[in-house]
Image (cartoon, coloured by chain):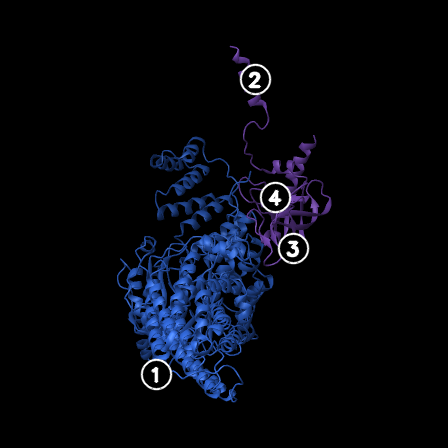
Amino acid sequence: MKKLPALVALLLVLFTTPGAHARIERLDLETMVKRCDNAVLGEIVARHVFAIDEAGSADRLYFTRLTIEGYSLRDRVPIRVDVHFQGGFIDDEQGVYNSEAPSADDTRIGARAVVFYKWMENMGGGFSGNALYAAHGGLFRTVDGPLGTVALGRGASFAVANNVSTASLETAVSRIRERENR
Amino acid sequence: MRAPTGLDVTHVPAVDGTTAAFFRAAGLLLFAAVMGRVAKVTEGSGVSVGWLLAAVTAGFGLHGLLLKTLWEPESRLGFGATVVILTAGAYFAVSRPGRGGEGEGEAPNPIERLGLGAAAAGATLALLCLAYHLRHLGMMQPEDDTVLGLVFLALLTVGAVAFGAPLAKGDRAPAVLAGGLALAAVAALAGVEILHGLLDPGALDAYVRRFGLDLGLVGTLRYLALIGGAVLVVPGFVAGTALAGARHRRRLSCVLLGAAAGTALWPWFVEMRAMSPLSYGQIARGEAGPWTWERVTHATWIAAAGAAVAAFFGTSGRTRLAAIGAALLAALLVFAPPRRGLWVFAPWQRLPAEPELVLHSRHGMLTVEPARGGARVVTVDRRRVTPLGIEEDQDADRIRFAWALLGHDLRASDAARVLFVGQMTPARAFTFDTLGEIRLDRTVPWHSHAKPIDDFLFQGQGEPPGTLLAPAEARRRLEDGSYDLVIVPPAHGPVVLPKSAANMPWAAAPAPATATLDVPDGTTAVVWLDAASPIANRDLGDRAILCSRGMDDLNVGMVLGDATEREKDAPAIVDPGPPAWRQGALSFVRTRALMRADRQKRDVIARIAAANEGGALADLCAGLALHAAAQRPSSPFETPAQRMELDDEALEAFARAADAAAPDAFARGWWEGLAEVLTGKRMPDKVLTFVQPVAESHGPWPTLERAVATAYREFGMPSEAADWYGRALESAPYDIALLLDAAEWSGRAGDDAREIELLRRADGIQPDRLDVAKRLGAALLRAGDEAGRAILEAALKRHPEDEELIELIEHGPGAREAIGPPVPGAHDHDHD
């Protein structure tokens, strides 16, 4: 009996403490919008790869910077923003491929996309900036079709799972923001 | 002198070992003749072997790496002319005796000369055995041989100058030469030991990394110099030291003649004991025997015997004792190291090759090994001479395109006579079978060892088709006009270290000589060449046809002799244009093997585009050139479609070409590849812009129609998607996957009746298929027809655990869910 209070306390700690259980969360649009600082719908106007020497290590870290010109999905304000992800090649010999990076088609200059990003103080090597959220899972290329512009979904468990018109996507993001702000 | 592939039509896939050996020997004979002249004019003054070797090294390197593109013989006549011109040039150039220098000493007597010749032959055979294996650590390009040869010559020079010159003073020279040649032969075993140590994939990687290199540099200048230097340093120094003793003109000539004899005898030496084919398993279990050690040992005994004879009859006193002692030491030293048999199977591969059949032969190492995709491939000295599984469709097209160049009447006559110059495989046999009744002969340069390979490839499948001929007999019949058609498939290089195990690229084969390829009147020949080979500077004749695997792996087929102009099913004939500049040898060997292909393709396709400018195929060829120029290295983590770069100007050129004329057999394959790439890249806008007009103009064309349907799916336009799936079905009514897609999108477009009709058709083709039953049952229930429930319940009896069936029966089909992307991406996994 003396042990009961301790046991109860232990159980309470286990079941009420956040993070006490391992969790796998699916990244849907609502979760993505809540976690990100912003999303931009626009055109990739510049693409630049650079390297950072990591302190205390002989390795170099390579980053790709995408400059996107368009407007914010949160508040429809025109913006020009730099978004970064790990990987890229400065030339034929210097660089690294990243299995989680978006494809060259998705990030070529002139491509249009919806890009979710979040500020990170340290993406590696002390480098801070807007990071492409969830690597390739944060970038959804758009294509112009007979019925308007469509964002290409990436399948189940991605923030944009199915193809959706950008108009619908904007509306969905707006509603999520409204619920957030209530 | 190296014999190139392509000396004649029967030697395009490879050079037979005997011819290759005679060419190399001829080079040494030339050198011996020139040295005879040099020594004659400098009579009284000894030959400075160090300077001689330095000059040879410089000249070898200068031609091999810098001047090769200016002068590269491509025929037996061309090589013969080279021999004559260089010999004459050397004779006239050497007009004054040398000044000073140490005297050449007494002339060797005939028995000493014989002994020296034998010693040199033995040393050469031992070193050739080492070189045979060492070459397999590279990309088997002529530039590889140049770099390794240069390294060896440099080591000879250093050996002669640093060690030989002080040792071979005065009357010691003949003894140093004789004894040194014997020791040079046994020193090859030191190289064998070092090479053996590098064969473990981890060891080779660790070794090159110590010098700041990596295995992606296999076949490049730095890598070859490093590996060559490591393996050849001991035999190189010893041989160089020995050669310093060849100060008398006749001794030097004897050594060179002996080396020529050894080189010429190599084919018989390597096959001195018939070798049964082995498997990798036998090699791994140590059942293969010490093949390499045996040959080096026999070569060393030849060298030692020759050296002892030369020393006994050519020297005296203590020098004689020392030389004979060295010969005896060499003969006994062979028993010291482990007795190795070397088997070099591209140790840089992530997944090591495990051949099912291996043979050492005069033609090189022959293997049959499994490749990615399950197909077996045949390699000759590590060059692949049969297609991979993914290449078999393209390989069949190569045969059919060549066949289509014959007139229709001849093809339909069941009497066409065909010579196939290449390795027959079951897939190729099937393709030939589809051509109808033909009289088929076949030949391969490795004819002497063809049977075990044929037997292995065709085990359990009967005899390979056609009559196997020796190359000489095939050439005789060809010259007699016995063939209507000759087909020569392309060869490929060794496998290259990939960036990812998902994609295993193969290097291109060396460019064959093409200038003298010819066939008699009445015969048509198509010699297929890989555009990734350095063929831009080759004479490709005045007609060619093209073949590709989708938008990749472009092949150029040189058309020789008669060819019917454009029957309906024949590929269009392009002008291959005059030879253009190709990447220089030094630049080529400094480029990573993985990066070479794009450059070579750009060069040859640009040449073809320039030659066809203003002609009927101008747009198609211009588009090909723009497409080739757009290619860049891609991430190994992308899909094949994503790795392909597309250029909008190229697409517009292709569109203009298709607008002007119906695509020929090659262009149809190219368009299908383009449709597949655009679908894989998820560019539905470009599918509608470029592919849809072609499908509309030149249909029925199910591949393109399907791509257009997929594009409308991406845009959420179900009616249009259903319509295009329907068009594709008209040409492919039994394609169940197509039926299911057409049914699905008909349903999404609101045409339930059409959906049910298509699903019933699918069920009729393959009754009781579970996915069809589910869809048909759901579609009927949606339409209010209870027959759907009976179908679902019948399926449940066969699959009682299927939860989706249970759900459908209990709750009905429900609303249609959104369908995910039509094409899986490279990142095909959930995200957390």
Q: Do labels 1 and 3 share a chain?
A: no
Sequence-first tag of 4 and 2 = 2
Q: Do labels 2 and 1 share a chain?
A: no
Q: Nearer the viewer, mark 4 or mark 3?
A: 4
- In the rendered picture, chain A carries what hue? purple
Residue contact between numbered discs 4 and 3, judged by CB atoms under 8 Å: no
Alpha carbon of mark 4 to alpha carbon of mark 1: how far? 84 Å
Sequence-first tag of 4 and 3 = 3
Report the residue at 44% width, 40% height from top: B779
Which quadrant would residue B304 be assigned to in this image?
A: bottom left
Secondary structure of the residue carrying tag 4 is: helix
**Residue kind at label 3, given as amino acid type:** Gly
Total tally of numbered discs in the picture: 4
Task: Pick the quarter of the image with the N terminus of chain B.
Answer: bottom left
Query: The numbered mark 3 sits on a residue in which chain?
Result: A
Alpha carbon of mark 4 to alpha carbon of mark 2: how far? 41 Å
Residue placed under numbered mark 1 in the picture: B110
- Residue A110's tag is 3
Residue placed under numbered mark 2 in the picture: A9
Alpha carbon of mark 2 to alpha carbon of mark 1: how far? 106 Å
